Amino acid sequence: MFQLDLSVPEMIRLAARVGSDVPFFIPGKTALVKGRGEVVVPVRFLTDYRILLVLPNVQLSTAEIYKKFEMNLTKYAHHVKFEAVILGIRNLEDLNYYLYNDLEQVAQTVYPELAGIRERLLASGAAYVSLTGSGSAMYGLYHKESDLEAVGELFSPDFRVYAAQPVT
């Protein structure tokens, strides 16, 4: 960085003086951040998969979704640390156990067609399916690019479909 010939740990130490969240950006890889942000622990995360993003031609209002959302932070009896989740994910199927978007059910009440998109993605072989944020896009994660070849045809012209891959 700036041809200063600094090691990564030295850059992280200097970056922490700039701001607590700055060290995260030095290694440029998936990482857990601890402390005030000055402790950056690289994590090997899944990268060998493909993403299919399905965008309906409808905009969901984030404000409306959150207004209808009944947050109950105590509905889960056990508490899981994010570090345990990241380290516990070994394959795409593990995501079904560890990750869930609480807003998806609410978004489906506003736009019921999302349930159909979810079902089509699962039926087409997606290992994991979820809503993006508060919607309206949904995505499926697939093991390989060849899994995506015929999937786009499952969606009517009412949807835009994009294939992507993770960036590391």
Image (spheres, grey):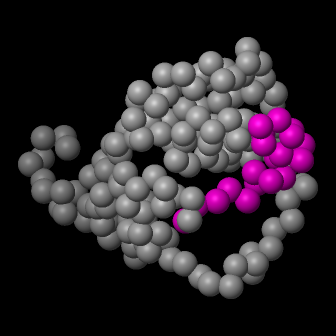
Task: Count the marks.
Answer: 0
Tell me if 83 is positioned left or right of 110 in this view: left
Q: Nearer the viewer, residue 22 or 74?
A: 74
**Main SS category, magenta section:** helix
What residue is rendered at 73% in x and 18% in y?
A: 156
The residue that appears at 77% across and 37% down in the rendered structure is 116
Q: Is residue 73 shown left or right of residue 86?
A: right
Q: Residue at x 55, y 32 (%)?
A: 52
Q: Position of residue 43 (x, y in %)?
A: 31, 61
What residue appears at the point 57 percent right and 26 percent down from the top-left corner? 151
Could you say where residue 89 lies in the image, as x and y percent from the top left?
42, 63
Q: Quadrant of residue 71?
A: bottom right
Magenta region includes residue 52: no
Residue 45 visible in the snapshot: yes
Residue 112 highlighted magenta (yes or no) = yes
Lateral position of residue 27 relative to residue 159, left or right: left
Quarter of the picture containing the N terminus is top left
Q: Residue furthest top?
A: 157
The percent position of residue 162, horizontal first and vertical second, equals: 56, 24
Closer to us: 85 or 59: 85
Left or right for 113, reference 135: right
Outermost residue on the left side: it is 5
Choose top left, top right, bottom left or bottom right for residue 115.
top right
- Give residue 157's position: percent from left, percent from top: 73, 14
Q: Which residues are magenta?
A: 98-116
Above or below, 93 relative to 136:
below
Q: Is residue 165 visible?
A: no
Split into 4 quadrants, where in the image is the C terminus?
A: top left
